[in-house]
Each structure stands twice: as C-alpha cells, then as structure tokens.
C-alpha cells in the first residue's frame, strides 16, 4: 500500500486562518444545536469499527464520544431522522459559499492549496492505474468549489455530482446502468454525514467493479487533534461530526468492501495549528516536549511535520480505495 509525503508547503492563514474560522465555527455550532432541537438519538457504537465508546466531553454543549477500539471521535447525538441533518448540511454549504464565511475571501489561495493538489493527486493515481478519461462522481452537499475545478479539467469524460445525504438514502439495487461511474471523490464527506457506513454502501452501488474512490478526512490520530483533543477549534460539527482515526477509516473502508491502495497523511499544518492555539492561549496545557517542538524554531517544526507525514501521524488523511468485485 502506498503512503505519500508532500513537499508542498503553505501557511495556515492561506487555508483556514485561526481567527477567521471562529465566527464560521460559531455559526456551525448554533446550526447544529438548532438541528438537534427536535427528536434526537444517541449513537451507540463507533461508526467506523462498531466498538463501544466512552464520552469524552463537550464542544459548546455538544457531547463527543471516543471509540474504545479505534480511537475515532464522533458526535454522540444526532437527529432521529436524516431530514434535519440533510437540511443542516445544505444550510452550512450555502453559508460557506456566501461572502459571510471566510472561505470566499480566500478563494484563490484555497484553489491553489486545497483543490488543485487534490486534482493532481487524482490525475496521478488514475495515470498510475492506467485509467483514462473516467466518469467521475463528486459526493458532496452542493455547492462545492471543487465541482468547477473538476468540470474545467479535461481529465474526465463526465463529472456527475451526487448529494451525499440523498446518496445515503438510495436503496440498494435501485441503480440504473447509466448511474454508474468509474471513480468517486469524497472530500471530507465521511466527516460530516450522519451515516458514513451507509454512504459507502450506496457508493459501492454506484461504482463499477474495480472502480476507485478518493477520500480525504481530518483524522483524530493526527498530531494536532491528539495533542489538543476537544480544545482544537478545528474540531466541531457538522464539519467534524465524525473524526475517524486512520485505523478507524481503514476498518470502515475494508468492511464496506474496498481494498486500500493508498493511505497517506500528507498534512502540512499540524504543528502550525498547535502553535496558533498556543499563541491564542499561552496557558494551553502542553507537555514540555510539545512546547519544545513548537519553540525550537522553524527548521525543527518543519522536520517534525515531515516526520508526522512519513509516519501517518498528521491529521490530514487521504485514501484511495478500490471497490472489490
Ligand atoms: Zn472504532
């Protein structure tokens, strides 16, 4: 199985600046509280590996659980039906696309640091596997900035968009031949949907045998999430309704019928994220070792970030799975 590092480097401020994130995060949290105002259900098992969990604390009053098997983190309470969650994701996606969220002011930088490297990753992988001009399915709650980039690329015969929450509710066997695709891409989709396992089952129905799926996720086994836990301001629902560990993601994909071709964590921001938290709150409880890594200078921080990538210990994960026949 492949594990890839990157020489790409960019500052936190070009992707998701600490201070600008906070109002967007508040909007997300208030919207989740509203969506949970109706009938709710408690998740009883880990959505990745089905083990027992323990409650570990709250993010703005919303309880998170940690799997005792794979150490994935997940929001404990969800609406009892998927309707309110679909509405919530649609509302957040519209908000992200509006000038009110920080994303639109960083559109050019985010294209360069977030989306174009992902397109390149997909194209390189397709080339490696001899797949030419595939029909691609983007699984997302529209609108998405990535849709335009995919459509403008000449790498695909067609780009189809599937609403992730609608895809979950599709019945197995209801698929037409014309619905099938060669490859699918899910950028942090498993992080936010209420039923990630059901999403992967439906995705399997859409993919041809041997078809590839490209997945990115923020993972709980990464450095900044491990060090900061629920203090991490980048951990909030619905964007991180699920924050799987690398082991949890591997387990989830294998048990839904995928063979893993690549599992990498080519993240570049872990150390910078912890540093941003420390600057924001100098009394942040960190170990002496962690403080040392952060304060010894840029070269040490960069070397440590490279180590995290090489050992699959960064919090940005990317995975390529192939659908088993
Ligand atoms: Zn688990």
Image (cartoon, rainbow, N blue to C red):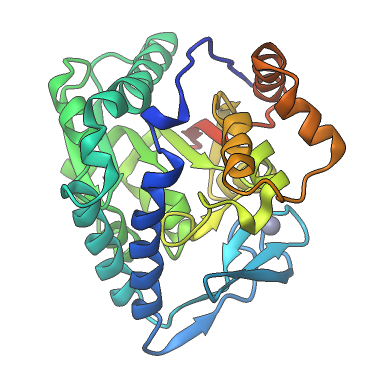
Viewer-proximal residue, 221 or 29?
Answer: 29
Q: Quadrant of the N terminus?
A: top right
Can you name the residue that lies furthest to the bottom here? 39
**Left or right for 42, reference 140:** right
- Left/right placement of residue 292 relative to residue 265 reads right
**Residue at the location (35% across, 61% down)?**
168
Residue for point 56% across, 44% down: 253
The residue shown at (67%, 46%) is 282
23 shown above or below 215: below
Q: How many marks?
A: 0
Residue 317 can be seen, yes or no: yes
Decide: is 136 above or below 121: below
Residue 106, how many percent across, how many down?
A: 26, 32
Q: Quadrant of ligand 1?
A: bottom right
Q: Quadrant of residue 58?
A: bottom right
x and y percentages locating residue 274 in the rendered image:
63, 38
Q: Nearer the viewer, residue 125 or 188?
A: 188
> In the visual, does 230 lie left or right of 70?
left
* Residue found at the far front of this picture: 282
Q: Give the quadrant of residue 149.
A: top left
Among all residues in the image, which is located at the extreme right? Answer: 288
The answer to whether residue 212 shows anywhere in this view is no
Answer with the quarter of the image where residue 64 lies.
Answer: bottom right
Q: Nearer the viewer, residue 110 or 4?
A: 110
Does residue 244 sit above or below 207 in this rendering? Answer: below
How far from the left and from the top, in percent, is residue 148?
15, 31
């Amino acid at each position: 199985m492949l594990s890839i590092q990157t020489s790409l480097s960019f500052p936190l401020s070009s992707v998701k600046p600490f201070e600008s994130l906070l109002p967007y995060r508040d909007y997300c949290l208030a919207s989740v509280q509203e969506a949970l105002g109706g009938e709710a259900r408690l998740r009883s098992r880990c959505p990745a590996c089905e083990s027992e969990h323990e409650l570990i604390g709250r993010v703005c009053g919303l309880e998170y659980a940690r799997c005792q098997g794979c150490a994935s983190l997940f929001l404990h309470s969800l609406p009892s039906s998927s309707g309110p969650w679909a509405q919530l994701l649609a509302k957040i996606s519209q908000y992200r696309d509006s000038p009110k969220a920080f994303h639109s002011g960083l559109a050019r930088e985010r294209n360069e640091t977030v989306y174009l490297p992902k397109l390149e990753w997909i194209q390189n992988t397709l080339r490696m596997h001899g797949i030419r001009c595939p029909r691609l399915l983007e699984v997302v709650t529209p609108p998405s900035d990535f849709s335009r980039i995919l459509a403008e690329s000449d790498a695909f015969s067609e780009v189809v968009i599937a609403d992730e929450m609608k895809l979950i509710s599709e019945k197995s066997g209801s698929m037409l031949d014309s619905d099938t695709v060669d490859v699918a891409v899910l950028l942090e989709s498993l992080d936010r949907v209420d039923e990630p396992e059901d999403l992967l089952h439906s995705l399997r129905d859409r993919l041809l045998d041997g078809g590839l799926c490209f997945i990115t996720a923020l993972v709980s086994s990464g450095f900044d999430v491990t060090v900061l836990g629920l203090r991490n301001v980048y951990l909030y629902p619905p964007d991180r309704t699920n924050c799987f560990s690398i082991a949890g993601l591997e387990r989830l994909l294998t048990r839904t019928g995928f063979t893993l071709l690549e599992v990498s964590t080519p993240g570049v921001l872990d150390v910078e994220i912890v540093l941003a938290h420390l600057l924001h709150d100098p009394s942040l409880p960190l170990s002496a070792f962690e403080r040392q890594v952060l304060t010894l200078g840029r070269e040490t921080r960069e070397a440590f970030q490279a180590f995290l990538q090489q050992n699959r210990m960064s919090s940005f994960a990317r995975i390529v799975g192939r659908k088993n026949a």
